Image (tube, grey):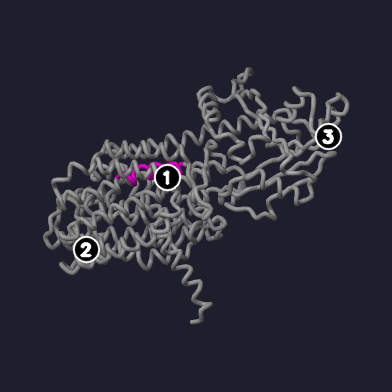
Amino acid sequence: MTETATYPLKKSALLGVGALGVVFGDIGTSPLYTFKTVLDMTGGNTPQTILGVISLLVWTLIIITSVKYAGFAMRIDNDGEGGILALMALLGVKRHKRPVIVAAGLFGAALIYGDGAITPAISVLSALEGLNIATPSLQHYVLPLTVVILLALFALQPMGTARIGRTFGPIMALWFLTMAVLGVWGIAKHPAILWALNPYYALHYLLHGGSGSFLVLGGVFLCVTGAEALYADMGHFGAGPIKLAWSTLVFPSLVLNYAGQGAIVLAGAPTAGNIFYHLCPASLTLPLIVLSTVATIIASQSIITGAFSMTRQAIQLGWMPRLKVSQTSEEGYGQIYVGAVNWLLMLVTIGLALGFRKSDNLAGAYGIAVSATMLMTTALLLIAMREIWKWPLAACVAVAGAFFIVDASFFASNMMKLLDGGYVPLLLAALVYLVMYIWHRGLMAMAARINEYPVPVDVFLDELAHTGVVRVPGTAVFLTRAKATTPPVMQWYVKHSRSLHKRVLAVTLEIASSPWVTPRDRLSMAEIGPNFWSITATFGFMERPDMPALMAQIAMNGCPIHPNELTYFVGMEKIVAREDGRGIPRLIRVLFAMLLRNGARVTDYLRIPAYQVVDIGRQISI
């Protein structure tokens, strides 16, 4: 094989190592608590039960992660990007009004925030609970240490993770290799556990285990929390490297470790405490606890970073208020920090750790959010198979229906834990969804009100000439949602100042349903009146608009402006009630006004220099 031919393989392998720290942190730390949780739910340690549980874990990993996500979902991308919001945007472009798709996508995204709050708490707690085995005298320090680690984790977020992130992949590679070795060590003590690779034992346990076997599915599902990350992080690493890392290292390590845990229980190991640490010789327990804790911190970091990225997507798509998004590194677009999300997640995560106190207790709250998100993804995959792949309806229903039965079974089982803490992620998701709904409803009402009485540009320019409005030197830039009519902010300004710059740019910013837009497709511009330019700039939902850079591109495309000599006019809206009774409900209006007041300034979001901005305050009744 030539050097040229091996280069893509080497690159894919390097990206695969990087993906270990970002994509597989959550699913990779599941063995710390999953098998123990399931055994507690079964109420028995008979050979048939152990074989059935291990078989369920293995085949759940195969069906959901290997088949559904790696085999199907990752073949549907939005210009290279994956995840439920990217899939929603891709399908939403097919038809103009698709409220069911939007609802499924948004609620699935909102549920991920619930998962993001629970994952750091349960992961760090489960890792430190190994102290109960290594040094029982330190068990009272598990919870305080968990809180300290979580505080440090969230406090370090503003600094970014570019430098630390370089070590994430190798550390997680060591973690997966360690899990594999421990698993082999356990299997050697009772090789009969390998019979669990036969799906017969999973089916036999489900069919003959009574109602208890159905409830156990809620615990089994914990082994695939984090599977959604394979699809969601596809844009960062590519489908190939993620599939390579999963099939060659992550999946084998998980199977070996779960089998090893089952083997030592069959061999008579105690099930009290954390079974994962019983795989390890006593002399190496403390080093394993340290490695486990680092692995859970990396998993938590990945969840937090994912929450930041999804928040930015939601902002770009118009479903969340503008929040301050800071780029923490020039090395990668995904290296961002969203302060509001970080501190809210910190409060909820630490609150969950203090409230539930043990990973076993948190397991009851875990799983509902992820299983519901997977259900939403399956619904969108059904539509994608039909509309993008053009599959026959029968084939779409057969494949997606099989996934739906599996997902629905896990979701129904997890719902049995609703009163044992399962309400927590659902409550968090409901709050996030409410914010999304209120913000979008308010934006639509505000846009409709502003454009209620449009004024054609030629009519407006004629009025300027006949009413004695003074034209002053310079170029004014007005941001507007109205592409074919006079910008309302400009009308407001002229009405009160009786003046207008000699050259005017009416700029409309649009967000595409794709994550990226090439510079060639960015601009649409035309001089629709003397020195009056109408410009539409399109950005992908993974891009952040930069007005100075945009103005430089506009100048290069023939518009006679000097980017450093522009004056930007920005509307500062105050929301009030309509007097004709046709406005939106009062509660939604009040909450939208609060979100609007507390969101990031549009000038900061668009990186407009403060010395070039004129704020135009005005009331808008909705």
The residue depicted at 43 percent of the width and 55 percent of the height is: 163
Position above or below: 123 against 354: below
Task: Give whichever of discs 3 and 1 has the lower sequence position.
Answer: 1
Residue 182 forms part of the magenta stretch? no
**What predominant SS class does the magenta segment belong to?**
helix
Look at the image and tell me whether residue 396 can be seen. yes
Distance from Cα at disc 2 to Cα at disc 1: 36 Å
Closest to the observer, 184 or 287: 287
The range drawn in magenta is: 107-121
Position above or below: 504 against 499: below
Task: Give whichever of discs 3 and 2 has the lower sequence position.
Answer: 2
Q: Check whether the beta carbons of the residues at disc 2 and disc 1 lie within 8 A of each other.
A: no
Look at the image and tell me whether residue 401 can be seen. no
Q: Give amino acid for label 1.
A: Gln
Position above or below: 620 against 170: above
Mark number, residue 108 = none
Q: Categorize mark 3 by other alpha carbons within 10 Å: few (<14), some (14-19), many (20+).
A: some
The secondary structure type at the circle numbered 1 is: helix
The secondary structure type at the circle numbered 3 is: helix
* Left or right of residue 535: residue 529: right
Q: Give amino acid for label 2.
A: Gly
Residue 109 forms part of the magenta stretch? yes
Check disc 1 and report the residue beneath it: 157
Distance from Cα at disc 3 to Cα at disc 2: 77 Å
Mark number, residue 260 = 2
Check disc 3 and report the residue beneath it: 458
